[in-house]
Every structure is written in structure tokens, then in C-alpha cells.
Image (spheres, helix red, strand yellow):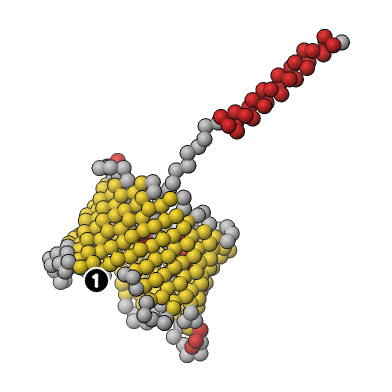
Amino acid sequence: LASSCEPGLFSLASRIMHLLYQQVFYIYLKPKKHHTMAVPPCYADLGKSAKDIFNKGYGFGLVKLDVKTKSASGVEFKTAGSSNTDTSKVAGSLETKYKRSEYGLTFTEKWNTDNTLGTEITVEDQIAKGLKLTFDTTFSPNTGKKSGKVKTAYKREFVNMGCDVDFDFAGPTIHGAAVVGYEGWLAGYQMSFDTAKSKMTQNNFAIGYKTGDFQLHTNVNDGAEFGGSIYQKVSDTLETAVNLAWTAGSNSTRFGIAAKYQLDKDASVSAKVNNNSLVGVGYTQTLRPGVKLTLSGLIDGKNINAGGHKLGLGLELEA
């Protein structure tokens, strides 16, 4: 009997040892994944999630129409028009964009109702991975005014930097910015230098922290203006943001709270209020794929009966 049990016991012991070996290998010997740090945002996009909650979905005092189309040859057309309900001023713009992805080239032509013409040529990821060069020119036939810019941007893990040169007859102005990020922490610096006056015209700092559903951003502009914002994604349907700003030497503090709630996959409502009792509400509805309607209103809480409230209507078409 003992001899007949030995093969079964040996087989059971072998299986147990094999399972233990698998667990040890999985826990200790399995190759570890190297988590890479995402490219940090550019300086202008620091705190962008909070800004979007405050700005997107509203169009107070405007009736707007935006149309985006794309031809069979790959040329993108973007047309925008708006009418100010207070001044009745109508403004419009037209933009065409053509991309040659194999060469990293993008050609953009712009025109607006101020009769300003613009041309932009962008080269990306050709000279070096993560390097973007942009040549931007504008010309106004009515006034004869011309301007030109050369923009450079470089981004990779942990760093995002850029340097722009704005050419002027008096002398070029140099704009520079850099953002570094590590394990969710972000730090940025932005400057502008006027070579004609040999003077620093902009000197800004920013620090922030970013995770998947939470963002904190603080900034100091020219050592006189202080600001901060907090963004939190409370749930899959609710996003909130808080904004705070003040200026040195002034007792006025600007404070605002905003929220966006997704009613369903096609509709959302937005609301915001600031310390001046200005209340903004917005409603966005996707009527069908490529057709989006936005309704918004701004109410002066201190003068509800006095009028002066603003309404807005926006329609976006994309095909």
C-alpha cells in the first residue's frame, strides 16, 4: 500500500513545488515595467484643465458659427463667424491647412475680416525627435503692416521648452519658456525680452502638481500678480474647478468656482460664479455627429432687475 501511494505523493509534491516556483518567479523574477514620465505641458497649458472648466461651453453676448470640413485631398478648412449682440459687430475668419505627414510639414493660410493675411509653415520631428519649428508671417494690405515670427519648441520626457523670436523694425522681441516635470510635479518659467529697449518685459514663474483626476497650479507674474487654480474630476460625470487671483498693492481679490456636469454622452451643463456675483450658465448638446449646439447666459447677481444680462448662442458643424 505504501509503495502504491508513493508515486501519487511524489506527483502531488511536484505540482506543489511547481506552483510555488511560478509564484516566486512572478513576484521576484518577473521583469519590472519601466514607467516613463509623460511629456509635461507647455507653459501656456499649465492649469489648462481648470481654465477649460471656466471658459469652454460659454459665449456670452455672441452668436457664433464654426464650420470645419476636410476635402478628399486632405486639405482642412475652418470657418468661423460671430456677431456681438451689444455692438452688432460681425467678425469672421477663414483658415486652410494642408499636412504632409511623411515630411512632418504643415502649411496654414489664414484670413480674417480685419483683412489680415497670415501664412504659417511648421516642420515637426524632422531635424530631431520632439523638435518643432514654425515660421509665421502676417500682412495687412490696408495698412501695409508686416510681421514675422520664428517659433521653436522642443519636448521630451520631463521637459517642454520653447523659444520664439518676434521680429519688428525697432528690434526683435524674444520669448522663452520652459517646463520640467517629475512624478506629477511641474515647475515652469516664462520670460520676454525686448531687444530694442534692452528690457525684460515678462518674468513669470509657475509650480503645479498633476495626477489623473486632480491638478493644482500656482503662478506669479512679474512679481506682482499672484494666481492659483484647483481642478478635480469628482466622478466620470462631474468636474469642478476653483480659481483665485490677486495683485500686489491692491485689496481686490478675484475668486471663482465652476463645474461641469455630463448629463449623458451627448449633453452637458456648465455653471460658474465669481466674487462679483456674476453667474454664468451653459448648456451643450450634440444634436447629431458633427453638429453641436451651445446655449449660455450671464447674469449679474447684484443687479438682477436692472438688466444688462447677456445671452449667447453657438453652433459647431464638422464634416
**Which residue occupies 30% across, 58% down?**
177
Q: Is residue 70 visible?
A: no
Query: Residue 234 in the image: x percent, y percent?
Result: 58, 61
Quarter in which the C terminus is drawn: bottom left
271 over 177 or under it: above or below = below
Task: Say which residue label 1 marks.
Answer: 114
Is residue 196 depicted above or below 27 in this figure? below
Taking the spot 82% from the left edge, 9% from the top edge, the residue there is 3
- Specify the quadrant of the image occupied by residue 48: bottom left
Residue 164, compared with residue 221, is above or below; it is: above
x and y percentages locating residue 278 in the rendered image: 48, 80
In front of the other: 279 or 119: 279
Q: Position of residue 275 (x, y in %)?
A: 48, 79
Instruction: Give the quadrant of the N terminus.
Output: top right
In the displayed structure, does residue 268 sit left or right of residue 119?
right
What secondary structure is found at the residue carrying circle 1? loop
Residue at (53, 66) in percent of width and height: 240
**Amino acid identity at mark 1:** Asp
Question: Neighbour class for label 1 at 10 Å: few (<14), some, many (≥20)?
Answer: few
